[in-house]
Image: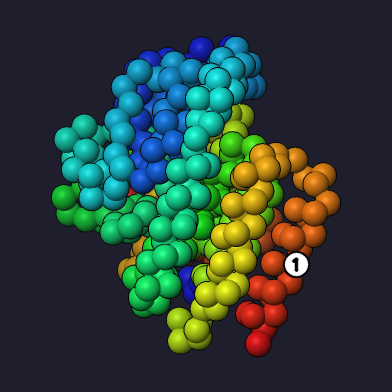
Amino acid sequence: MARQHPIELFMPPNMLKAKVGGTVVGLDMAAINRAETAMESLKSEFANWAQDDVRRLVAARDAFAANPGPAARAGLLRAAHDMKGQAATFNYPLIARVAGSLSQLIHDLPEKCELSLGLVDAHVNAIHVIYRDKVMDMSNKMALALAQELEARVTEALGA
Amino acid sequence: MSGYRFDRLKILVVDDNVHMRKLVVTILQAFGVIQIFEAESGERAWAVLRESNPDIVVLDWMMEGISGLDLVQMIRTDPQTPNPFVPVIMLSGHTHIDRVRQARDAGINEFIAKPVSVKTMMSRLMSVIENPRPFVRTKSYFGPCRRRRGNNEYRGPERRAEKTVQAAE
């Protein structure tokens, strides 16, 4: 980005520091441990989050299939992108990977290019299978091969 | 122990995904934050911001309607903003460097790439408390300085020096 002039540079007063006080002596491990414990128990409470997200993704897919316009495409991208972020946080790395591949396909494919419903469906189905079989690690060879194949198809679609 | 009084902070958490919102709120509560406001959309966040004037905003990038990026720009430059200097920590599934730059150019202070981790959240909070960035105003940008901190390590020519206006003085 080209530098612009004039530049006004100033330091606002640090109200946050004044408010919270404290001193920096590394991370507060007690607070971190409390938060990690709370996060773990929340993950188990959220056993159904993936089910909700899969439903949302399927609904977005159906809306896109019925009317493949920009709005439906944007909805599909949001659903896939959300799933990518959530799945990684809630211990479904393979779902995150496949959802990431779908996000990349939708985001990087120019608007004027047709988004292949077949390739969208392949991703949605893969996510279904990984969730159904509760694959929560990266050692499942079948699921890994599926993710790799989908990524290769996306690269092909984007390179075409 | 850092001895931070997190209980004195007001934090606004903005995410259209209820699970992710709850996760962030849970982490902040475990840190000791008591006053947490939640918003499920950019529109709602803008209203809450103006009502509650939070000390920190944690927000998701991708939301329907007003996106996280739009909201940051409103916070920084809209005449109705309650505090254009409020620190903004952006959460995103986007990890590509171009996207991080885009968020930085909108005026965020810190970026957290999902998956969200407790340590990253704590370190970003500590960053906005301990190492606030100076603010910059140019013709097309207002927000935290987009250079990384550690400017003391820069050994090149001081290209800005001549035309910089030290407004704080």
Residue placed at 59% from the left, 23% from the top?
A: A40
Residue placed at 45% from the left, 50% from the top?
A: A55
Residue B39 placement, left or right of B111: left
| Circle 1 residue | A149
Q: Amino acid at mark 1?
A: Glu
Up-down relation of residue B55 to residue B80 (above or below): above
Q: Position of residue A124 (x, y in %)?
A: 57, 60
Q: Is residue B84 visible?
A: no
Element under label 1? helix
Up-down relation of residue B27 to residue B47 (above or below): above
Residue placed at 44% from the left, 36% from the top?
A: B19
Residue placed at 40% from the left, 43% from the top?
A: B17
The chain that hosts pointer 1 is A
Up-down relation of residue B17 to residue B77 (above or below): above
Q: How is the image coloured?
A: rainbow
Location of residue B65 by image quarter:
bottom left
Q: Position of residue A152 (x, y in %)?
A: 73, 72
Residue A77 placement, left or right of B44: right
The quadrant the C terminus of chain A occupies is bottom right
Q: Position of residue B37 (x, y in %)?
A: 29, 30
Q: Is residue A138 visible?
A: yes
Judge by depth and name the residue closer to the eye, B3 or B51.
B51
